[in-house]
Image: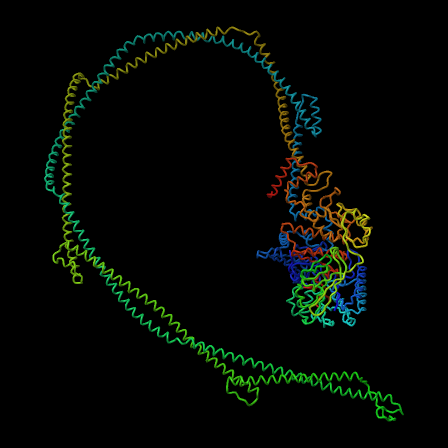
């Protein structure tokens, strides 16, 4: 996260809109934020933190305090931060909640806080404070707390990092090193252990409940103990309770078996008694039965007799039946006979019909045969007529072939001939054509050649012209050069002249001065002498002893030296002036020379130069003229050159054309050759064809010419030949047609013949068939007649046998007889049955009586009454026992159930207990709640590895910063209260002690926390987690360091900036101001321009 | 013409809390003696005269003494401010001192006029360039500000402005970091990292007296030279011999360079050994125990009250470090066990063993593994 631009409006001490462009500070390195106290240095960090997370950077300020008190009521408070994250630009804009005056009316209104995050890829922006904070946290990977611990170390906060407890540190590391899994694991284990514990408890409780339900009235000792345990709630004594229960069950079981046995016995006795009673009862029953049976037997007797009588009667009438039966048989026989007779009669009729039919058919057949016979004879006659059709056919075929063949040949040859002739014509035409073309080409060729020759001489001309042109250019250039040089010389001359004038002036001035000085000197001398004049002493100059007007001393005493100096000056200046004048003269001469030269050149160029008048003007005009002349010459030369060039072009063109024409001509000649060859070939073919045709025709021997036709070679003969060929062809074709017709006829006849033959054959076959059929029918007829005869005889016989009686009457009689027979039989049978039945009954009764008698043997010993009482007793006893048993049984079952349940639960309990114990140990270990051990959680343990790495990195810096004295270390042992694992100690190498970090001084603490923060940010960077900290901010704290320490701290921070990081420092320490070049200076403004603070960037 | 080249006096510097002012006084005295002997025509002080922009009082007094003494000798003194000095404060009364042949570089304004010295081979121009930052030069040459991005550009522009005549011998005093110079611990790297200048920029000068780097060396040509500090200011300089550079300029094209060694009052040395070795009488008897020492103990364990005890023998002990397996390990970050390389279950097992002094049971282990998988899958 690297800030690019920060814009604050009415924020903190910044009354208006203030902009800071961080990009001007470069993209890596340190920069310093410095300024007056209270100017707004920390506010810049606050603004950044606020823009990102909605809170100020430290703990001291709240978001509501951020509105600027200097701001105009109308100015809104907001912060906009543009930052780079992973090379993409994001913009966050946020405004806090604050009171501002209502737009209409009096009083203040609350303006709600707001935020907006814009993405670089055009996604929809995020609004609403919380959402934006969340989005930013997600983006950067740190929430505000972590950000303030890692990337922005606020004023007064650096101690916190050092002194933070394990809990806080753990949270931070969880976020950064993604150890949340372990925490989740811890929680899960804890929950599971708790669940398991509950389950365990539950099971125990249920076991207890069960055991509470155990009942035992039988064994007092056991029951007492059981009750005691119940009272105690089976705490820990579940096993004992189960034991007791077992024993109770045992006892109860025993009792139950006892009771069961008793019950058995009683039952047995009861059964015995019952049996005896039963016997009595039985006896009584038997005697009653006996009596009954006897009565029955008596009643039966008379019936029996009757039945016997009837039966006997029936037996006698069997004979009648027999007679009836035979009669019936006879009648049946007779009926059969009648039926047979009828049938025979029918048969006879049929046969008659059949034979008649057969006779008819025979007659038919015969007529048919005769008809067929006639037809056949006719056909045979016709056949004879068509006998010779077959041979004709062959002869005709052969003829036809021959004619066809001849015609074809002739036709083909004629066509060939025609074709060849046509081709020959064509070839001749082509030849002529080609020849004409050739002529044309030749003519063109000669023409072109002539033209080209005409243009030969142009090359030489071109060269000449070019040379002229170049010369002209040369001259012009030279002219220009000279002119320029001349002008330069003029300038130099004027300079020299000026110099000379100046030098002369100086010289004159100096001369003047010298003279004055000389005079003064002399005057002075005089004054000096005058001083020494005494009245009466002779004057050294004039010798007079009187001195009426001695010379006065001049004010300025000019020394001889001075004079000398001045003289020297003067001479120097004179020399200079001479020099300058000489220079001027030199230059003048040079100019003159050049001019004459130039004139000479000009005259050469154009001869119209004037010689009088102003030299400059003349020169100019002459120069102008010369130039004009040169240019016109040049233009003419150029034009000529152009012409020549075009001429050359044309010549080249002609050469090319000549070439193409050459090519054409060769082509044409070639074609001529081809045509000639073709013609020759065609002629030979023609001759060949002709020969063959004549051969053909002569073979045909058409009417007219003889041998001469074959050798004709000119058109007339050709025509005649062709005519003849045509004629012959026509003749041949006519012949062919005739033959065709004949062939067709013949074919027809042949067909007819075949047809007739077939017909004849068919007819013969038919006749044969017919004959067969006739024979058949005759045979049939004969057979029918035979049968008829036979039947007739039989019928007669039967009629005779049957007599007069007819069938119907006979049937009536039969049925009546049958009825009768049946009735009789029925009657007889019935009677028999009744009789037999009665006999049987009588027998049965007899038998029963017998048995009853047998059974009346054994009588029990006791009387019936005795037995009954006994029975009652036993019954009651049984009832009691049964009741007792059922009670006991119920109790036993219940106890058994309880035991089962408890046993089952017991197993489960054991299982659960195992799991619980193991889970609890896991959970306690993971959550650090083991008794007697330091409270290190699993997550913390994992984080210690990371922590160690961080400490190592931090120590690299701390060792350097403290000159090898201090090193941070993770606390190994400590008190057992509170969470542990990520506490810090510091090692002092100078006296080899280990002590708590709280013993460090202020400056040392700053060093340590700075190292720790740097170590942490380094480690975070080194992870591949994606959190990139490109910017760091340190707010104060440097004031507590001395020079050396400050230097070391600076070194450490500078080391950070490798790899693209920006570190911003807020400090007022002047050393840092000197050392760090890029600065943001915040200053308070008072008076002009309103109040508030301003920000200026320096050193960029 | 004979010139004496010095630089980086860092008067008033404190090293590991020790004030070096006494040693500096001693060495400056030695340099004065040398000046009396050699009688140079000029003494070149190439920057970093003080250690801080606002120097300590005694440092100011010391410089006052030194310059006065040199002036008494009659040598010309040429002085430029370095990156540690404040250019404005250094050039206080600079113009007035010209009469005593003490030439101090002004705050850079764009023009640099040379001081002309004459000898029998003609004139020599001495150019004084204080420590230049790009922003300084941009400020002085506003029209060309856009072209000045780094120190290289700044120097180039500054030298262009000088318009140096090629037929005269020219000497430059400058205080910059030239590419290729070897550094040691006591230097300050220029914050920002754009301070490198290529030696080719000095091609027009016959001799370039450079300051800023604390070890004596030359860059490319032997005439482009850092003379180094007169005293050792960090333990990385222990092996060096400190010296003063004497330069003889004859006719144009001939430069002779000679080194005169300096002997300090208290040397800066490094001593190494185990505690017993180092405190053995045989070890330190006869050696200069008053020297500034860095003691590296090879004992595995920290010696209790080590500093105290060693200071008894070596009163000027500056630094105590340990070089044993632990420190070696500490420096090697990769030795740290990577938690990622072990699975979560393994870590838990380890932790469990530590806390319970017994390993996990199999059921516990499988349970933990199952949970871990579940959680990882997002359960």
Q: Residue at x 31, y 72 (%)?
A: A443
Nearest the camera: A1059 or B36? B36
A575 lies left or right of A441: right
A601 lies left or right of B350: left
Q: Where residue B157 sits in the image (x, y, percent)? A: 66, 68
A394 lies left or right of A893: left
- Relative to A506, does residue B193 appear above or below in the rendering? above
- Relative to A819, does residue A657 appear above or below in the rendering? below
| Residue A608 visible to an observer of this rendering | yes
Which quarter of the figure has residue A728? Answer: bottom left
A714 lies left or right of A33: left
Q: Residue at x 36, y 68 (%)?
A: A660
Q: Where residue A737 sits in the image (x, y, percent)? A: 15, 51
Q: Quadrant of the N terminus of chain A?
A: bottom right
Q: Quadrant of the C terminus of chain A?
A: bottom right
Q: Colour scheme of this structure image?
A: rainbow
Which quarter of the figure has residue A615? Answer: bottom right
- Relative to B192, does residue A400 appear above or below in the rendering? above
| Residue A1078 visible to an observer of this rendering | no
Q: Where residue A546 sits in the image (x, y, percent)? A: 87, 93
Nearest the camera: A492 or A585? A585
Q: Where residue A703 sits in the image (x, y, percent)? A: 12, 56
Nearest the camera: B81 or A289? B81
- Relative to A629, does residue A723 appear above or below in the rendering? above
């Amino acid at each position: 996260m690297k800030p690019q631009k920060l814009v604050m409006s009415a924020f903190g001490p910044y009354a208006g809109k203030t902009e800071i462009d961080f990009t001007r500070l470069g993209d890596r390195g340190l920069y310093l934020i410095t300024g007056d106290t209270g100017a707004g240095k920390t506010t810049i960090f606050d603004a950044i933190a606020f823009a990102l997370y909605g809170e100020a950077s430290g703990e001291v300020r709240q978001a509501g305090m951020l509105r600027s008190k200097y701001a105009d009521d109308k100015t809104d408070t907001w912060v906009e931060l543009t930052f780079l994250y992973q090379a993409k630009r994001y913009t966050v804009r946020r405004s806090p909640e604050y009171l501002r005056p209502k737009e209409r009316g009096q009083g203040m209104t609350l303006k709600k806080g707001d935020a907006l995050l814009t993405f670089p890829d055009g996604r929809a922006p995020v609004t609403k404070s919380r959402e934006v904070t969340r989005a930013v946290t997600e983006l950067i990977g740190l929430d505000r707390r972590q950000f303030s611990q890692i990337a922005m170390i606020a004023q007064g906060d650096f101690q916190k990092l050092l002194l933070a407890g394990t809990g806080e540190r753990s949270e931070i590391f969880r976020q950064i090193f993604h150890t949340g899994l372990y925490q989740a694991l811890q929680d899960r284990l804890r929950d599971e252990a708790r669940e398991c514990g509950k389950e365990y408890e539950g099971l125990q409780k249920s076991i207890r409940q069960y055991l509470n339900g155990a009942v035992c009235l039988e064994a007092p000792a056991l029951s007492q103990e059981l009750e005691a345990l119940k009272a105690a709630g089976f705490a820990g004594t579940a096993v004992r309770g189960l034991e007791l229960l077992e024993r109770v069950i045992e006892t109860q079981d025993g009792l139950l078996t006892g009771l069961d046995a008793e019950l058995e016995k009683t039952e047995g006795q009861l059964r015995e008694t019952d049996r005896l009673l039963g016997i009595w009862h039985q006896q009584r029953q038997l005697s009653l039965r006996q009596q009954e049976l006897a009565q029955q037997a008596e009643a039966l007797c008379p019936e029996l007799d009757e039945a016997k009588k009837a039966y006997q009667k029936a037996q006698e009438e069997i004979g009648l039946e027999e007679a009836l039966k035979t009669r019936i048989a006879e009648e049946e026989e007779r009926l059969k006979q009648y039926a047979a007779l009828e049938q025979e009669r029918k048969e006879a009729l049929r046969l008659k019909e059949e034979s008649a039919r057969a006779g008819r058919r025979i007659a038919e057949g015969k007529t048919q045969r005769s008809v067929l016979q006639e037809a056949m004879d006719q056909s045979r006659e016709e056949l004879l007529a068509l006998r010779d059709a077959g041979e004709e056919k062959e002869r005709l075929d052969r003829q036809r072939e021959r004619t066809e063949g001849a015609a074809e040949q002739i036709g083909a040859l004629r066509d060939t001939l025609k074709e060849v002739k046509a081709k020959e014509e064509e070839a001749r035409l082509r030849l002529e054509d080609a020849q004409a073309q050739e002529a044309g080409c030749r003519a063109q060729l000669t023409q072109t050649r002539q033209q080209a020759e005409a243009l030969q001489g142009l090359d030489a001309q071109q060269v000449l012209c070019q040379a002229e042109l170049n010369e002209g250019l040369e001259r012009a250039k030279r002219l220009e050069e000279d002119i320029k040089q001349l002008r330069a010389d003029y300038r130099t001359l004027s300079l020299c002249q000026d110099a000379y004038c100046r030098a002369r002036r100086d010289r004159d001035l100096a001369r003047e001065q010298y003279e004055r000085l000389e005079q003064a000197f002399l005057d002075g001398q005089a004054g000096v002498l005058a001083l020494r004049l005494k009245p009466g002493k002779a004057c050294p100059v004039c010798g007079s002893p009187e001195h009426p007007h001695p010379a006065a001393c001049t004010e300025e005493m000019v020394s001889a030296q001075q004079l000398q100096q001045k003289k020297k000056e003067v001479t120097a200046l004179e020399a200079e002036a001479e020099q300058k004048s000489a220079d001027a003269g030199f230059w003048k001469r040079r100019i003159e020379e050049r001019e004459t030269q130039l004139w000479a050149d000009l005259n050469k160029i154009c001869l119209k130069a004037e010689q009088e008048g102003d030299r400059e003007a003349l020169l100019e005009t002459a120069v102008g003229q010369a130039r004009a002349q040169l240019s016109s010459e040049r233009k003419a030369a150029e034009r000529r050159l152009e012409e020549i060039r075009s001429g050359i072009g044309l010549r080249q063109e002609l050469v090319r054309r000549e070439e193409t024409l050459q090519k054409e001509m060769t082509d044409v000649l070639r074609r001529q050759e081809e045509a000639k060859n073709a013609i020759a070939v065609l002629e030979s073919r023609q001759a060949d064809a002709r020969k063959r045709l004549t051969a053909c025709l002569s073979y045909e021997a058409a009417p007219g010419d003889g041998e001469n036709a074959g050798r004709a070679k000119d058109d007339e003969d050709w025509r005649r030949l062709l005519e003849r060929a045509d004629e012959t062809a026509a003749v041949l074709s006519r012949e062919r047609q005739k033959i065709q017709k004949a062939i067709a006829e013949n074919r027809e006849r042949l067909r007819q013949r075949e047809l007739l033959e077939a017909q004849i054959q068919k007819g013969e076959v038919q006749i044969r068939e017919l004959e067969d059929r006739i024979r058949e029918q005759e045979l049939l007829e004969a057979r029918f007649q035979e049968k008829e005869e036979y039947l007739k005889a039989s019928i007669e016989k039967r009629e005779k046998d049957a007599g007069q009686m007819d069938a119907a009457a006979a049937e009536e009689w039969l049925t009546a007889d049958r009825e009768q027979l049946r009735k009789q039989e029925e009657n007889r049978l019935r009677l028999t049955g009744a009789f037999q039945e009665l006999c049987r009954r009588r027998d049965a009764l007899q038998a029963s009586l017998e048995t009853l008698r047998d059974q009346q043997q054994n009588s029990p010993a006791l009387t019936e009454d005795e037995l009954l009482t006994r029975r009652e007793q036993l019954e009651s006893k049984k009832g009691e026992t049964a009741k007792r048993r059922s009670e006991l049984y119920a109790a036993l079952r219940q106890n058994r159930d309880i035991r089962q349940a408890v046993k089952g639960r017991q197993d489960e309990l054991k299982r659960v207990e195992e799991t619980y114990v193991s889970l609890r140990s896991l959970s306690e270990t993971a959550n650090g709640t083991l008794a007697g051990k330091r409270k290190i959680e699993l997550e913390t343990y994992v984080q210690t590895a990371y922590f160690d790495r961080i400490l190592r990195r931090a120590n690299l810096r701390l060792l350097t910063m403290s000159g090898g004295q201090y090193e941070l270390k993770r606390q190994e042992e400590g008190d057992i209260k509170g969470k542990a694992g990520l506490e810090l100690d510091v090692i002092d190498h100078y006296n080899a002690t280990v002590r708590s970090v709280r013993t460090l001084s202020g400056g040392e603490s700053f060093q340590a926390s700075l190292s720790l923060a740097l170590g942490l940010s380094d480690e975070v960077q080194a992870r591949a987690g994606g959190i990139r900290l490109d910017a760091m901010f340190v707010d104060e704290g440097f004031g507590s360091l001395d020079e050396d320490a400050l230097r070391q701290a600076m070194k450490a921070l500078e080391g950070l900036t490798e790899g693209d990081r920006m570190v911003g420092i807020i400090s007022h320490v002047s050393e840092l101001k000197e050392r760090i070049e890029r600065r943001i200076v915040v200053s308070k403004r008072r008076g002009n321009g309103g109040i508030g603070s301003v920000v200026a960037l320096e050193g960029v | 013409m004979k010139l004496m080249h010095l630089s980086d006096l860092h008067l008033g510097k404190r090293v590991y809390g020790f004030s070096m002012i006494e040693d500096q006084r001693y060495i400056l005295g030695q340099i004065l003696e040398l000046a009396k002997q050699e009688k140079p025509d000029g003494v070149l002080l190439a920057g970093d005269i003080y250690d801080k922009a606002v120097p300590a009082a005694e440092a100011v007094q010391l410089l006052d003494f030194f310059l006065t003494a040199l002036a008494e000798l009659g040598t010309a003194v040429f002085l430029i401010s370095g990156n540690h000095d404040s250019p404005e404060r250094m050039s206080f009364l600079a113009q007035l001192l010209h009469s005593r042949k003490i030439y101090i570089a002004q705050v850079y304004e764009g023009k640099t006029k040379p001081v002309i010295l004459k000898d029998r081979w003609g004139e020599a121009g001495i150019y004084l360039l204080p420590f230049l930052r790009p922003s300084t030069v941009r400020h002085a040459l506003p029209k060309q500000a856009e072209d000045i991005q780094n120190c290289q550009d700044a120097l180039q522009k500054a030298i262009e402005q000088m318009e140096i005549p090629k037929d005269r011998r020219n000497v430059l005093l400058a205080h910059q970091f030239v590419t290729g110079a070897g550094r040691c611990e006591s230097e300050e790297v220029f914050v920002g990292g754009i301070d490198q200048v290529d030696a080719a920029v000095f091609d027009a000068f016959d001799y370039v007296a450079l300051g800023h780097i604390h070890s004596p060396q030359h860059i490319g040509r032997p005439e482009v030279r850092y003379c180094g500090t007169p005293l050792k200011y960090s333990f990385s300089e222990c092996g060096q011999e400190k010296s003063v550079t004497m330069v003889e300029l004859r006719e144009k094209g001939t430069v002779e360079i000679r080194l005169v060694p300096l002997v300090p009052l208290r040397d800066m040395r490094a001593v190494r050994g185990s505690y017993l070795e180092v405190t053995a009488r045989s070890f330190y008897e006869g050696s200069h125990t008053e020297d500034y020492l860095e003691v590296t103990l090879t004992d595995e364990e920290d010696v209790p009250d080590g500093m105290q005890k060693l200071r008894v023998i070596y009163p000027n002990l500056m630094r105590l470090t340990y070089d044993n397996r632990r420190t070696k390990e500490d420096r090697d970050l990769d030795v740290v066990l990577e938690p990622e390389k072990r699975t979560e279950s393994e870590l838990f097992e380890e932790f469990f063993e530590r806390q319970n002094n017994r390993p996990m049971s199999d059921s516990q282990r499988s349970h933990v593994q199952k949970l871990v998988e579940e959680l990882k899958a997002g359960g």
